[in-house]
Image (cartoon, coloured by chain):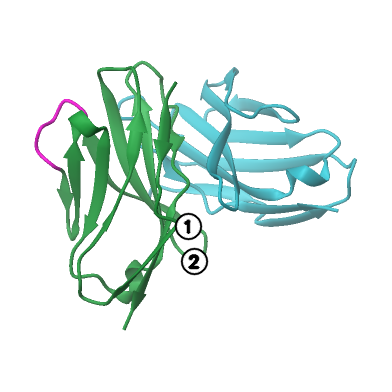
Chain colours: A green, B cyan
Amino acid sequence: AQKVTQTQTSISVVEKTTVTMDCVYETRDSSYFLFWYKQTASGEIVFLIRQDSYKKENATVGHYSLNFQKPKSSIGLIITATQIEDSAVYFCAMREHYNQGKLIFGQGTKLSIKP
Amino acid sequence: DMKVTQMPRYLIKRMGENVLLECGQDMSHETMYWYRQDPGLGLQLIYISYDVDSNSEGDIPKGYRVSRKKREHFSLILDSAKTNQTSVYFCASSSSRDSSYEQYFGPGTRLTVL
């Protein structure tokens, strides 16, 4: 059965440093998509970045990048040069190729950026 | 401007009352979703709609039903609401033209059932 697990409940780092958030997933499908979403304090959920399972290159968007380790079923989110506004809850999610649209979410990691 | 809207944003109901949550999108997305979010549990899928009158149960459909009569609107209905349905409800949409089905989320509705 498909499952997404984020074991870090919360992380706190100092502004302008780099942070990595972990996510592991379980799937029997050979083709799948992995996503990271950010939920701000206001509750807004915003898509950040995506990794397609067949791509070997790690995805990068702005100061977000992914560490995709397929043999370990792991998709870490790396945020470089963190800013106060990066403080939020970050969700990892997976969609299997055959499963039209259905996303499985992890429990979320709360990131706090300190000045 | 791509947008998913939800109405109302906040709602307080008494146990046993009926609840209607509405969602709209302006992107002509075929697929729409309803989720609920509870502390520590992330987002749980209630229902998916693949297009008008083409709905499918998600992981936690019990106690909910949906209606989709127009592509741009998707409603979540709670018949005789229960206190354990107090939660934040999110609607989302995605396009089947995008193979990843990347989802766009609405702002959420905070429902309290007393």
Question: Over which residues does the magenta segment extend?
Answer: A53-58
Q: Which residue is mark 2?
A: A41
Direction from residue A36 to residue B109 in the image, left or right: right
Q: Is residue A50 above or below residue A21?
A: above
> Badge 2 sits on which subunit?
A
Name the residue type under label 1.
Answer: Glu
**x 35%, y 23%: residue:** A27
Corner quadrant of residue A115: bottom left
Residues A91 and B64: in front is A91
Q: Element at badge 2? A: loop
**x 58%, y 27%: residue:** B59
Q: Nearer the viewer, mark 2 or mark 1?
A: 2
Q: Which residue is mark 1?
A: A44
**x 20%, y 47%: residue:** A66
Query: Looking at the picture, how far across and down is residue A39, in whole percent?
Result: 44, 57
Query: Looking at the picture, how far across and down is residue A80, in whole percent?
Result: 18, 64
Q: Element at badge 1? A: loop
Direction from residue B76 to residue A74 in the image, left or right: left
Question: Any magenta on residue A1?
Answer: no
